[in-house]
Image (spheres, rainbow, N blue to C red):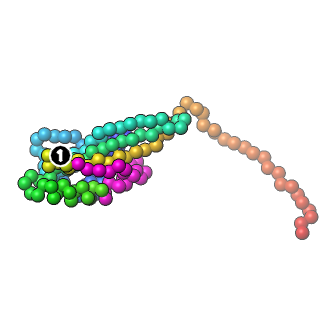
């Protein structure tokens, strides 16, 4: 599920920012083009929910690394505003997932944008036999006295 959400974030960022921004799912130390985004899941919590389900809280961090020496803070603030807008809802496995708890921090010229994509998940137990068929009999009462 985490990889699917990361891919959905990457697709959304490419659509919003275009080809001039590199989107990385893995950090690479060399030949990193700027400006770029680095995506990672920083925290995931699984809590029981009802009988056969659980609630997954998934916190993601999108790091934005601006072009060096060209109004770095201004680039980061502009990117943050666009991230608030484009990450409010993703399509994951053909289902909409809403981004919550959005916030950002600036550390050493790098924007760290945090967003949660939480999801209720129901476990299927394939060992239980499914109902294969049902039959019923119906009878209509014949009422000759219709008014």
Q: Secondary structure at mark 1?
A: strand
**Extreme-top residue of the structure:** 127
Residue at 32% in and 38% down? 43
Going by the image, does 69 lie left or right of 120? left
Q: Quadrant of residue 45?
A: top left
Q: Which residue is mark 1?
A: 107
User: Does any portion of residue 109 appear in the rendered image?
Assistant: yes
Q: Is residue 93 magenta?
A: yes
The picture places residue 96, in percent across and down from the top left corner, at 41, 53
Q: Read off the magenta span.
A: 85-105
- Residue 44, compared with residue 36, is above or below; it is above
User: Does any portion of residue 8 appear in the rendered image?
Assistant: no
The secondary structure making up most of the magenta span is strand
Going by the image, does 134 lie left or right of 137? left
Going by the image, does 36 lie left or right of 132? left
The picture places residue 109, in percent across and down from the top left corner, at 14, 49
Q: Is residue 139 magenta?
A: no
The picture places residue 69, in percent across and down from the top left corner, at 7, 54
Residue at 48% in and 35% down? 48
Residue at 47% in and 37% down? 54
Label 1, residues with CA under 10 Å away: few <14, some 14-19, many ≥20: few
**Extreme-right residue of the structure:** 145
- Residue 81, compared with residue 116, is above or below; it is below
Q: Quadrant of residue 5?
A: top left
Residue at 60% in and 33% down? 129
């Amino acid at each position: 599920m985490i990889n699917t959400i990361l891919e959905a974030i990457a697709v959304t960022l490419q659509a919003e920012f275009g080809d001039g921004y590199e989107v990385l799912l893995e950090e690479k130390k060399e030949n990193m083009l700027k400006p770029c985004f680095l995506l990672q899941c920083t925290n995931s919590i699984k809590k029981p929910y009802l009988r056969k389900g659980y609630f997954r809280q998934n916190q993601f961090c999108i790091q934005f690394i601006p072009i060096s020496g060209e109004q770095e803070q201004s680039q980061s603030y502009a990117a943050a505003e666009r991230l608030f807008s484009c990450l409010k809802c993703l399509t994951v496995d053909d289902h909409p997932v809403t981004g919550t708890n959005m916030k950002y921090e600036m550390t050493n010229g790098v924007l760290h944008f945090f967003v949660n994509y939480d999801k209720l998940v129901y476990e299927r137990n394939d060992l239980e036999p499914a109902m294969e068929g049902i039959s019923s009999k119906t009878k209509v009462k014949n009422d000759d006295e219709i008014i």
